[in-house]
Amino acid sequence: MCTHLPVRKKGGVRLLGWPAESTETVVVSSAAGPLSIGHKEPAGHLFHTAILKQHGLFQYPPEEDEEDKGSNKSGSSGGDKQEKSTGAGLDDQPPPGVNWKGSKKKKTKGKKEGQDLYLLLGLQNERFMATDNQIKNAYRRACLEHHPDKKLTQSESPEEKQRVEDHFKLIQEAHSVLSDPAKRREYDSTDHFDDSLPLECDPADFFKVFGPAFRRNARWSVDPKVPDVGDEKTPYDQVEKFYNFWFGFKSWREFPHPDEEDTEGCESREHKRWLDRQNAKLREKGKKEESKRLKEFINAAYSMDPRVIQKKENDRLERERKKQAKEDAKRRAVEEAEAKVAAENAARQAAEEAEKKRNAEAKAVREAEKNTYKKERQRLRRL
């Protein structure tokens, strides 16, 4: 049964009222379309928690302080309206009604304690060039050599036992980090590296100064096939491929931030994705600085490379030669045109002179014939 319900206003929003005395079944329908939501709604137990927070019925754990409670209450009530109205900051804030605080700061394993993970496995010479098989074999050798059951005896002191056990734990931790591609990439990114890059040098020492810098930074390339800088005898097509590669250089180097959150203790996949986005934003500054540093270095190398300078000089000379040849061809064409016009004028004048000469000769012949005819008439008259 459809019926008309009273309409009342509350805070500028039109609401449907419900008559208290009515006992009949009421079906309410609306022709309004679906509303666009600018964020993801919580579901499951998170939805239940969000509703309790909106109505002020949620019981916070005792370990949370009063400041966190007030921020969560205000964020669950007024923050939703602000996000719906503005639509800004949706990626920076968790979904409404979700409290994702309390994550621990991320720690770079092995770095804080000053431990060299490669040294623990005996790969201090290979380091980032070590393959997965080398890491696996080195870990097995280290376990056989430093396992507490083989290193310790009953006569050892408690301090020595603790030292051996701690060292074996460090070996296990080193293997867990270096066997994981993501963790190893992060560890290799923070490993000791000479970040100094030359920006100028004497042209004669270009390959001695810039060559080692290019080879050092080639370790960060996503593409393992990195072209070498070469020498002064390298063909220019290879030099051009070399600089095209570096101008489009893609680096796998990471720049961990001290304020990053640890994603291993996340509550859910959404929580982990949210923390990944926050950590990626913290690392973005380091990546931009690295990209700017490499760009300045590559531009300086390109401007000082003697092969590029020689190529530019050859191109300039070739352009000037072509320009001079073009001007010479144009000048010869003008000269040939002028010579042709002069020849035509000379031929026309010669023809005119010849015509005048023929006319004069013909006139002289006519005059001679006229005089002869006149003399003959005179002679006939006398006779």
Image (cartoon, helix red, strand yellow):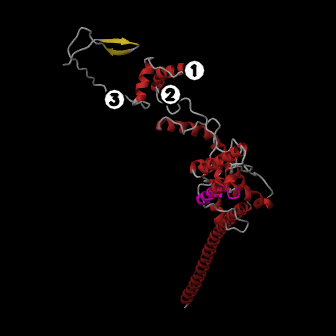
Badge 2 local density, few (<14 within 10 Å), some, or many (20+)? some
Evaluate whether residue 251 shows in this view: no
Q: In the rendered view, tell whether residue 361 sits above or below residue 173.
A: below
What numbered label is drawn on residue 34? 3
The stretch drawn in magenta includes residue 125: yes
The residue under the point 59% across, 49% down is: 176
Circle 2 residue: 99
The correct choice, above or below, for 276 with respect to 341 in the image is above
Amino acid on which the number 3 mark rests in the picture = Pro
Q: Position of residue 174 (x, y in %)?
A: 63, 49
Which residue lies under the disc numbered 1? 65
* Residue lying furthest bottom: 383
Question: What residue is shown at x 51% (from left), y 36% (from top)?
Answer: 266
Q: Amino acid at mark 2?
A: Asn
Q: Residue at x 26, y 22 (%)?
A: 29
Residue lying at the far front in this picture: please name it.
155
Q: Position of residue 253 (x, y in %)?
A: 63, 49
Q: Furthest residue to the left?
A: 1
- Asked if the residue at tag 2 contacts the one at tag 1, i.e. Cβ–Cβ closer than 8 Å, the answer is no
Give the overall secondary structure of the magenta segment.
helix
> 115 and 243: which one is in front?
115
The quarter of the picture where residue 107 lies is top right
Question: Disc 3 on helix, strand or loop?
Answer: loop
Q: Secondary structure at mark 2?
A: loop
The residue segment tinted magenta is 124-140
